[in-house]
């Protein structure tokens, strides 16, 4: 059982993600703002982050809170209090279907360090498979 943090400002979608992951026996916390995600990452051990790219927060007037959160995890400043390791598995999601900048933002999320990017809507099985892949222990070396 993994501890998964979800940051998504759409309560319905956050609930769907939470429900799907709890069915896989994961412990899930859903927040709607980057500042709430930072609070959790400073006080709790988290095994995986799922973040929406377009969230207004973290003191920014633009809706790229997910990108800022990924950057803060991957490139912590000297005063960072995050408990999350810089290699925390991250899935970045975007629901800006049809928005001309969506692919650019998904590319940016990958460039900033997201391990997986998904465009909404996506099947629950796709999410569950990516979560399990990212959480699988790294056996290192060749199989026996």
Image: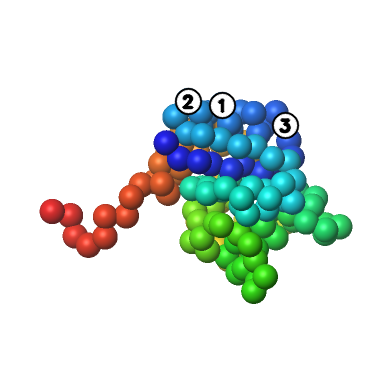
Farthest residue toward the bottom?
78
Quote the CA–CA distance across marks 1 and 2. Answer: 6 Å
Q: Which residue is mark 2?
A: 23
Where's residue 122, x and y in %? 56, 36
Where does label 1 land, which residue?
Answer: 19
Taking the image as shown, residue 28 lies to the left or right of residue 97, namely left
Q: Secondary structure at mark 2?
A: loop
- At x 83%, y 58%, the residue is 59
- Give the residue drawn at x 54%, y 52%: 90
What distance separates the C-alpha of mark 3 from that of mark 2? 18 Å
Query: Which residue is located at x 49 percent, y 53 percent?
Result: 89
- Is residue 26 visible to the viewer in this orientation of the structure? yes
For the residues marked 3 and 1, what is the alpha-carbon distance in whole angstroms?
12 Å
Q: Is residue 83 above or below residue 120?
A: below
Image location of residue 64, percent across then percent down: 75, 56
* SS at mark 1 in the image: helix
Residue 85: percent from left, percent from top: 51, 60
SS of the residue under disc 3: helix
- Which mark, by number, is residue 11? 3
- 42 with respect to 115 (left or right): right
Q: Quadrant of residue 97?
A: top right
């Amino acid at each position: 059982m993994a501890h998964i943090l979800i940051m998504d400002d759409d309560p319905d979608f956050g609930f769907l993600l939470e429900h799907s992951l709890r069915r896989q026996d994961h412990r899930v916390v859903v927040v709607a703002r980057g500042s709430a995600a930072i609070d959790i990452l400073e006080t709790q051990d988290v095994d995986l982050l799922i973040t929406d790219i377009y969230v207004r927060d973290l003191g920014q007037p633009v809706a790229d809170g997910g990108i800022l959160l990924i950057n803060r995890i991957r490139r912590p400043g000297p005063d960072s209090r995050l408990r999350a390791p810089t290699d925390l598995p991250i899935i970045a999601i975007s629901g800006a279907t049809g928005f001309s900048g969506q692919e650019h933002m998904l590319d940016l999320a990958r460039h900033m360090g997201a391990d997986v990017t998904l465009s909404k809507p996506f099947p629950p099985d796709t999410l569950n498979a990516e979560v399990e892949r990212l959480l699988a222990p790294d056996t290192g070396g060749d199989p026996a």
